[in-house]
Image: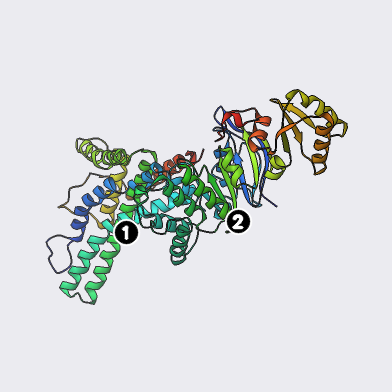
Amino acid sequence: MTVIRGEAVRKSWGQTVALDGANFEIGKGVTGLLGPNGAGKTTLIGLILGLHKADSGTLTVLGSDPATAGPDVRGRLGYSPEHEALPPDTKAQDIVRQLAEIHGLPRKEATARASDVLQEVGLGEERLRPVGTMSTGQKQRVKLAQAMVHGPDIVLLDEPTNGLDPVQRDEMLDLIARIGSKLGMDVVLCSHLLEEVERVADAVVILDSGRVARQGLMSELAGAETELVVTLDAPDAAAKVITRLKRRKVEAREENGELVVVLTDDATYDAVRDALASAGAGVRRMGRRRLRLEDVFFDDSGSGSVASSRPEGGRR
Amino acid sequence: MAFAGMGPPVTVRQLFALMSTPVLLFVIGVAPVGMIADRRSKSLSLYLASPLTRETYLAAQAAAIFVAVCLVSVGPPLLYLAGNAVIARVGFGDALHVLRLAGKIVLSGALLAASYATLTLAVASFAKRAAAASLALFCLAGILTNVLAAAVTEGVSPYFLLIDPSGLAAELVNRVFGPDRYLPRADYYGVAGYVVALAAIAWTLLALGAAWFRYHRLVVSR
């Protein structure tokens, strides 16, 4: 089921084109909105919230146009901005309660919900501290708490792991995954980090220079093309094996002296075994390799500006 | 307009005039802080990501400033009036007079608060820092008023006073209470009441329009 749909969405800021005819669909679950800095992610979030209007194209959020039905749409959304956006002198509990009230919750219920949600994000003990005295990780949690305090249908998280150390980042990603699964809210996770999108997202929309470079379910984009990597005793034997595999309609290639076979079903293993035996090739190591989102992204956009925590050599 | 039959040291009207300085100080020092803090801390993006629109946000801010200024402008004169009424044990005849005075206090305080609230809204919309907003308000509500009053005393047309929004608010209070010969005031001699009212309304609309224009163009998430 589609919760957010964009057709030929275009938005410019002066001479700068932020979104250039983006077509996309965001469904239920956790969706990663991935792209390098300047790809148009934050502009798209602003359009989804109805904070600005698209120059052209159609955008539908939960069945409504946010440009015309902004307050109704925003009432069903939660938003955690990329930048620090919390008044430093206000207690975490107060700001979360206040935003719950603005979303229409009665004061008593808003107070209770603020406590609950701050507990949920791990700030139960810290909720009465002024936000200005909190660490970056705690502030990110407060932002997350205020985004979900009113029980929205969709939570928009713009770079929620910015400024976090690795441990805090892991905890934040676990929290986001929990929002999507346990709390039943759909999540749009804006990020320029491939690994975190891979880790928590069910689907991904990859933006590059204002266009959608690719989109779909993670399993479709990255999971389908699992490969078998075989390191042979004699690298020159790879050509013989590939010839035999192609006769059995199995796709294979040589890569950095290794034999790479595209796995389609279990019969492929039999074909590889037979081809190796028939070519007399000795095997030193064999293992499966799953295509990663990074491979998909670089194949499509050719951009190198999306950050990855993997080393250079990790890229195919 | 002395308080009937009790001979208090100052009249309610005079107290109201005395209160104009604390009101002005409150407006200059406190009123613009909230709006500017929202923009500087970027909390505005959180508020506008809620069912609030830019218009409802501004309306809420204006209402908050209005109520706060009303507490300062209306509260003390009303308390003074109530205190004197209790001390004098006013009878039925005087009670009507007290109620009429209370009505004038509320009306005058509300006019003053509305004028200052919209002025603050406009200035705070454009200023980047609270100190800059305070300075601008001081120039508008403090210096301009005195310069124009001095100019009119020197023979400049009293219609020049209409370009002073803060002075207009004070003049509206004068018109509500009537003249008090013990109070200094800018000389609006010959300027009709409806002209003063129209000028005050025009300033209010202009200030609201300026704030709306600024917030309408403000990019809060990009």
Give the secondary structure at mark 1. Answer: helix
Chain for numbered disc 2: A
In this orientation, does residue A72 appear?
no
Q: Residue at x 76, y 23 (%)?
A: A236
As shown in the figure, which amino acid type bears the numbered disc 1? Answer: Leu
Tell me, what colour scheme is on the image?
Answer: rainbow
Q: What percent of the width, then of the height, locates residue A170?
A: 51, 47
Q: Report the disc number at residue A181.
A: 2
Task: Say if labels 1 and 2 share a chain.
Answer: no
Across the whole image, how many numbered discs are drawn on residues? 2
B16 relative position to A19: left or right: left
Label 2 Cα crowd, 10 Å radius (few <14 / some 14-19 / many 20+): some
Residue labelled with disc 1? B107
Residue under the image location 61 percent in, 42 percent down: A198
SS type, badge 2: helix
**What quarter of the picture does the C terminus of chain A occupy?**
top right
Viewer-closest of A266 and A191: A266
**Residue A228 against residue A1 in the figure, above or below:** above
Q: Position of residue B72 (x, y in %)?
A: 26, 56
Residue A208: x %, y % from top left: 62, 32
Nearest the eye: A181 or B63: A181
The one nearer the camera, A86 or B88, is A86
Residue visible at 56% across and 27% down in the picture: A15
Asked whether the viewer can see residue A118, the reply is: yes
Say whether residue B158 is left or right of residue A208.
left
Q: Is residue A305 left or right of residue B146?
A: right
Depth check, mark 1 against mark 2: the one in front is 2
Assess disc 1: are there few (<14), some (14-19) or many (≥20) residues with their C-alpha within 10 Å of its C-alpha.
Answer: some
Q: Chain of mark 1?
A: B
